[in-house]
Amino acid sequence: MDLFQPTTHAIHIGADDLPFVDAPSGEKLKVLHALEKEGMWIVETIFPAGYEVQTHRHTGAVWAYTVSGAWQYKEYDFVNRAGSFLYEPANSVHTLMAVEDDTRVWFQIFGANLNLDEHGNVASITDARSALLGYYWMCEQAGLPRPNVITDIEV
C-alpha cells in the first residue's frame, strides 16, 4: 500500500503477504506498517535464542505482543512468553534478549529508537523511514520484490 491514503475501508495484509527477511544482525524481520507523518511503525521479528538487541531508548510509547518463544529485558526480572503483552512508556531504556529460539514478537513503535553505546550516548537512530528503507533493502538483497507495506513514505 505504498503512499497510504487515509481511508474508511479496512486494509488486509495476510500472514504470508509480507516476507520475513534475514537482517544483518541475525534476526528475521518484516515491516508491516510505516507512517512517517504519524511517526509510527510496526514490525514483526523472529529472534534466535541468545540474541540481544542493542541497549536502546524510545522517544515514544511501544506496545509488544509475544507470539511465540520467550524474551526479556536485561534490566527487568520478568520474561515475556507467548501471549504476553508489554507496554513501554517513552524514554524507558532496555536491552532485549531472546531466551528461546524462534521468539516471535510484534512491536508497534511511536517515534524513534535511539540505540545507545556503552556510555549511554546515541550511537544510531531507527525510525519509521529508516526501518522501511532497511526492510526494502534487505528484501532486494534477498532477491525478493518490493513488499506492499502500508506506508505514507515516498521512496
Image (tube, rainbow, N blue to C red):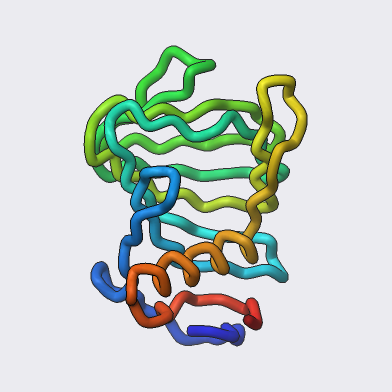
Tell me: 115 left or right of 65: right
Callout count: 0
From the viewer's perspective, is residue 129 above or below residue 143?
above
Q: Residue at x 24, y 29 (%)?
A: 100
From the viewer's perspective, is residue 142 above or below residue 78?
below
User: Residue most toward the top?
Assistant: 77
User: Residue most toward the right?
Assistant: 121
Tell me: 30 left or right of 59: left
Q: Where does the C terminus fall, quadrant-wise?
A: bottom right
Residue 6 placement (x, y as % from top left): 60, 83
Q: Residue at x 53, y 27 (%)?
A: 95
Work out whether residue 149 or residue 82 is closer to the camera in this orientation and state it: 149
Q: Residue at x 37, y 49 (%)?
A: 45
From the viewer's perspective, is residue 155 above or below residue 39?
below
Tell me: 32 left or right of 4: left
From the viewer's perspective, is residue 82 above or below residue 43?
above
Quadrant of the image occupied by residue 10: bottom left
Q: Residue at x 44, y 30 (%)?
A: 52
Quadrant of the image occupied by residue 128: bottom right
Residue 123 placement (x, y as % from top left): 71, 38
Work out whether residue 61 or residue 57 is closer to the camera in this orientation and state it: 57
Residue 89 placement (x, y as % from top left): 64, 35
Residue 48 placement (x, y as % from top left): 28, 37
